[in-house]
Image (cartoon, rainbow, N blue to C red):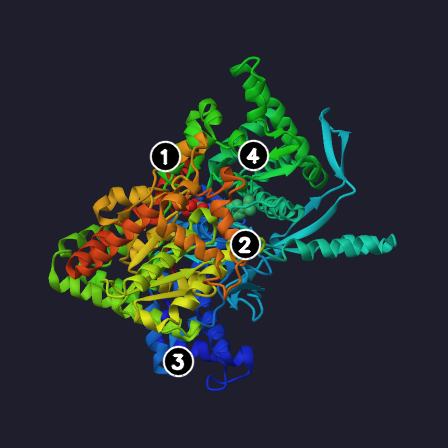
Amino acid sequence: MKNILFDKKEFIKCVKDNVKTLYRKTMEEASEQEVFQAVSYAVKDVIIDNWLATQQTFDKEDPKMVYYMSMEFLMGRALGNNLINLTAYKEVKEALDEIGFDLNMIEDQEPDPALGNGGLGRLAACFMDSLATLGYAAYGCGIRYRYGMFKQKIKDGYQVEVPDNWLKNGYPFELRRPEHSFEVKFGGYVQAEPAENGRTKFVQKNYQSVLAVPYDMPIVGYNNNMVNTLMIWDAEPMECFELDSFDKGDYRKAVEQENLARNLVEVLYPNDNHIQGKELRLKQQYFFVSASVQRAVARYKKYHPDIHKLSEKVTIQMNDTHPTVAVAELMRILLDEEGLTWDEAWAITTKTCAYTNHTIMAEALEKWPIEIFSRLLPRIYQIVEEINRRFLLEVEEEYPGNQYKKDKMAIIHDGQVKMAHLAIVAGYSVNGVARLHTEILKKQELKDFYELFPQKFNNKTNGITQRRFLYHGNPLLAEWVSNKIGNDWITDLSHMEKLAVYVDDPKAQQEFMQIKYQNKLRLAKYIQEHNGIEVDPRSIFDVQVKRLHEYKRQLMNILHVMYLYNKIKEHPDMEFYPRTFIFGAKAAAGYKNAKLTIKLINAVADVINHDASIDNKLKVVFIEDYKVSNAEWIFAAADVSEQISTASKEASGTGNMKFMLNGAATIGTMDGANVEMAEEVGKENMFIFGMSSDEVIAHEQNRDYNPMDIFNQDQEIRQVLMQLINGFYSGNDTELFRDLYNSLLNTQCTQFADTYFCLKDFRSYAEAQERVEKAYRDEKGWAKLVMLNVAHVGKFSSDRTIQEYVDDIWHLDKVKVTVTE
Ligand code: 26Y
């Protein structure tokens, strides 16, 4: 196999040529950004050969493929990851070193393609990596948002959202594929017309349309020549229609068409787990889903004569309900374009589409007002109505006369279209993302559906890719692991268990903790440069990084910091191991309490970090603009991982796994995948606290929790709460944090106070934090504990997760790509 990446000279020549042709410059004249572009194009050159070879292999071997449909792909930077997966990282680093360029600096020039909010989007990215590495044919289908997740600036302690123009300099790893464009139609009305076969044909009239144009991004498998494709759709105006309109003198319509295209893909909605029901979002959903389904069917038909057998070669995985219109779109294509009967089309659709649920939060469940849905997607709405009508007949058969059941389970009810119900009725598989989450779905949230379709329900506990989150993000630890147990962990994380023999070895412990220290230095430098705060790398780095949401309880964390501060002030001589509490989180732009929590964290940081009297025992840092690229550094440097959601609320969590992989200890509730982490590493090697999900659910059902009782009984908690409204952290502005205080204690309306049980779990949390401190003082014990965590992380690779999806849901064929010269 010829691979120019392995030939340093040729690679450097390619980079130099690129700088010359792209910018008419020499290496010396080129800016860092230009060098990044030139290096990336050189890497892309190599990828393209494998990409072509992969496509040829697909054509020849005709494997079954998964279309992973997702509104979000939080990919993070590609250059470093591609080099890792091409097994060329080291060579390229050396080659660039020789001509005086630092690969890390070059990597730093790449914008983070942040086409996602948080967990769900990053999961999709990890899945793409694992699919390619395991040798499965997969297309990721999404949207090429012009603006991804906003950049976060902190001004005067407040979050300020700045647009993320990630395409500003051009993105070297994408490829525009206009030859695979499709028309997507919105609005108008449906006309029934007689068809040749004597049936009725439904035709959409007087619609507006856009042209969906795909951009392909390569997804490089690890060391296997495989390159899958992420296709993200851009919207362009339909040229011909525009001329047509001019002909008709319909200038307004032509402009509308142009605007529709521009607005459609303009921006990613920055809401995570909270639906706003905006019409444009439904437009985005149908836009990328329609284009992707059309492409999947077209590709299938190119090679296969019989559309009835679609499900033998194609499976569509819907990442949450966001792409659920896919089931109706597939029905539309089969009925209206392929001319199948309803029963034929339904048989195919229900063998092709599968659904993953990522949340039980009521406010995240997608429901669309009929008015919006039917106006925007008139034909799709008709089809959903028919699916609903037939489904309710089924329910009637199973539960005769039970109107209550029908109302509860209907896809269309109370003026709304319920996307989860549609996904479950039409999907052949419904999965949750951690065992506890799936059990809650079966026993509570989706109980009625589980009773009707038990065979559809299954669990697929999430995972993460060790290639990005250890190999790339933590090179020191990766190398140490490889020295100890070889390289097999890179493609099979279960090998980590071989590290268990080292956990009592003093030398190994020392090496391990030394690496952690180096990574803490790296992060401390980043914090100094970006926040201007000096942190002591010998202090305990206690980290909570994730989206800001009340159920994730950043508020409980910062209340505990306030409590610790009070203690230190009151007992200056008490033993206290220095701690640095690190936060990173973006809040949805319209989420008031979340934004106020960011302000509170920064206000507390301001007071504590400037109090010389506490002798640097406590520091608080809010890292601006938490994103995939700085996340890699943060995980590597953490001692303590905060996974403290109210039990039952976090479907899985994946950050928890990234910390574990990097040798941090978890302080957490028995929620989401924490439960399975505890099972793998042993509860004694984590710091578990708080109510169980059963207890939480019982309180919610009985409505018997009153946070006022805690306020009245617990003097220290009361002191902390009073500091929210006595100006202690707000320069005497007693109103600044009033809403947070009220969210915990609202005296008028205790039913809605402290919805997420921050006060209820506070004592148990504080006590777990004491255990952390005690454990950390025991250097050897701590080293052993975190090494045990790394040794037992094997289950949490997305390679394992993907293999389970393949075995139980998708049934894909493995592909082997060979590259001949
Ligand atoms: C409907 C819309 C506003 C919406 C947009 C984004 C709803 C939800 C989301 C995002 C949800 C999400 O990220 N969920 C997370 O998925 C992860 C991957 O499965 C889980 O680990 C995590 O617990 C869950 O909160």
What amino acid does circle 1 point to? Glu
Q: Is residue 744 visible?
A: yes
- Say which label, 3 or 2, has the lower sequence index: 3
Identify whether 28 is placed above or below 622: below
What amino acid does circle 3 point to? Phe
What amino acid does circle 4 point to? Ile
Q: Is mark 1 on a helix, strand or loop?
A: helix
Q: Nearer the viewer, residue 202 or 686?
A: 686
- Say which label, 2 or 4, has the lower sequence index: 4
Q: Which of 401 and 489 is in front in this view?
A: 401
Q: Mark number for residue 52?
A: none
Q: Can residue 554 be seen in this view?
A: no
Of badges 1 and 4, nearer the viewer stands 1
Query: Could you give the CA–CA distance between mark 3 and mark 2, rounded to whole angstroms?
Result: 38 Å
Of badges 1 and 3, nearer the viewer stands 1
Q: Is mark 3 on a helix, strand or loop?
A: loop
What amino acid does circle 2 point to? Ala
Say which quadrant the N terminus sits in: bottom left
Give the percent coordinates (x, y) of residue 652.
Answer: 39, 44
Query: Could you give the CA–CA distance between mark 2 and mark 4, rounded to whole angstroms?
Result: 43 Å
Identify whether 464 is placed above or below 322: below
Q: Mark 4 points at which residue?
A: 307
Query: Could you give the CA–CA distance between mark 1 and mark 3, rounded to whole angstroms?
Result: 57 Å
Other residues around mark 3 within 10 Å, as few (<14) / some (14–19) / many (≥20): some
Q: Mark number for residue 588?
A: 2
Q: Mark 1 points at which residue?
A: 695
Identify whether 610 is placed above or below 231: below
Query: Could you give the CA–CA distance between mark 1 and mark 4, rounded to whole angstroms?
Result: 50 Å
As drawn, is 703 to the left or to the right of 403? left
Give the percent coordinates (x, y) of residue 523.
Answer: 35, 69
Give the percent coordinates (x, y) of residue 447.
Answer: 46, 27
